[in-house]
Amino acid sequence: MSHIPSSAMPHAAPSANSDNNQNALGGQHSQNEGMASSVTAAAGKIADLARENPKTAIAAGAAVVAGVAAAAAIPLVRNARSKQSETKSSAGKSDGTKSSASKKSD
């Protein structure tokens, strides 16, 4: 694997602050805390936007609820359609058998 010097891409070099945090907290633990704090910050921004634009927030919430309802309905519709097709195919087979049996007995 090739080595690209940090001087070629200064933004790619690890910062001294991240090294200290990983060493002090054991690496993985500090990454989880960083992710949690960024999620919390994003949630705070979303809450602020919702307070500033309540009608837009209501519309967005309704869209999310509609999406969840549609996602939940898809398996139900597929099951209902598959049951209908099974019923139609088995009904067609039984009708064919009955009609042929009645013709033979005449």
Image (spheres, rainbow, N blue to C red):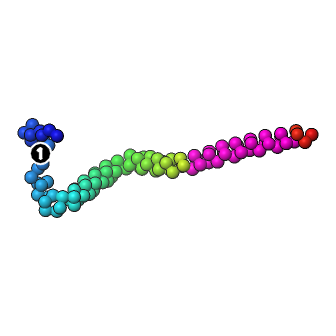
Residue drawn at the location 40% of the way across and 47% of the way down: 60
Q: Residue at x 51, y 51 (%)?
A: 72
Q: Residue drawn 82% across and 43% down?
A: 98
**Residue 55 seen by the camera:** no
The x, y position of residue 37, in whole percent, is: 24, 57
Q: Residue at x 88, y 39 (%)?
A: 104
Residue 99, magenta (yes or no):
yes
Outermost residue to the left? 7
Q: Is residue 65 visible?
A: yes
Q: Position of residue 94 (x, y in %)?
A: 77, 44
Amino acid type at image mark 1: Ala
Q: Quadrant of the C terminus?
A: top right
- Percent across and percent down for residue 70 are 51, 47
Q: Is residue 87 left or right of residue 98?
A: left
Picture quarter containing residue 26?
bottom left
Q: Which residues are magenta?
A: 76-102
The one nearer the camera, 12 or 91, is 91
| Residue on which disc 1 sits | 13
